[in-house]
Image: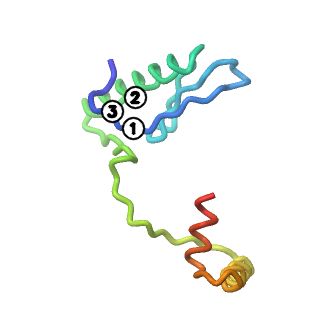
Amino acid sequence: MVLENDRYTYRVIWSEEDEEYIGLCTEFASLSWLADTPEEALTGIRQVVSAVVVDLKANNESVPDPLMTKQYSGKFMVRIPPEVHRRLAIEATEAGISLNRLASAKLSQ
């Protein structure tokens, strides 16, 4: 069984160690599913997530919201060492752009 309206964030990666594909779900970081093909890994992790969501609901526990349905402001604070701040401010000034624009460009890479 797979969740109806499943909007969770899934990823499938290859594991050299296991010599299998691993299905992962970002919102449920402790869960995974090993399979011979990427398709089976995705199907497996979706089934595991579905079962966990059903169990959480049955026990009146909170169910994580899918990341893709959350609203983001586009703002967050990052603390960096003063010398890095100075170096970035110099770089931004030399490029003729704001420090915010420089940081956004670097984070987008």
Q: Residues within 10 Å of mark 2 (few under 14, many from 20)?
A: many
To which residue does mark 2 refer?
49
Q: Is residue 105 left or right of residue 82?
A: left
Q: Is residue 71 left or right of residue 107?
A: left
Q: Secondary structure at mark 1?
A: loop
Q: Residues within 10 Å of mark 3 (few under 14, many from 20)?
A: few
Q: CA distance from mark 2 to mark 1?
A: 9 Å
Marks 3,2: beta carbons within 8 A: yes
Upstream in sequence: badge 2 or badge 1: 1
To which residue does mark 1 refer?
8
Mark 3 vs mark 2: give the one in front.
3
To which residue does mark 3 refer?
6
Residue 56: x and y in percent read 31, 33
Which three-letter amino acid code belongs to the residue tagged 2? Val
Marks 2,1: beta carbons within 8 A: yes
The correct choice, above or below, for 62 with respect to 56 in the image is: below
Which three-letter amino acid code belongs to the residue tagged 1? Tyr
Upstream in sequence: badge 3 or badge 2: 3
The correct choice, above or below, for 15 with respect to 26 in the image is: above
Residue in the picture at 38% in, 60% down: 72
Q: CA distance from mark 3 to mark 2?
A: 9 Å
The correct choice, above or below, for 30 with respect to 106 in the image is: above
Which three-letter amino acid code belongs to the residue tagged 3? Asp
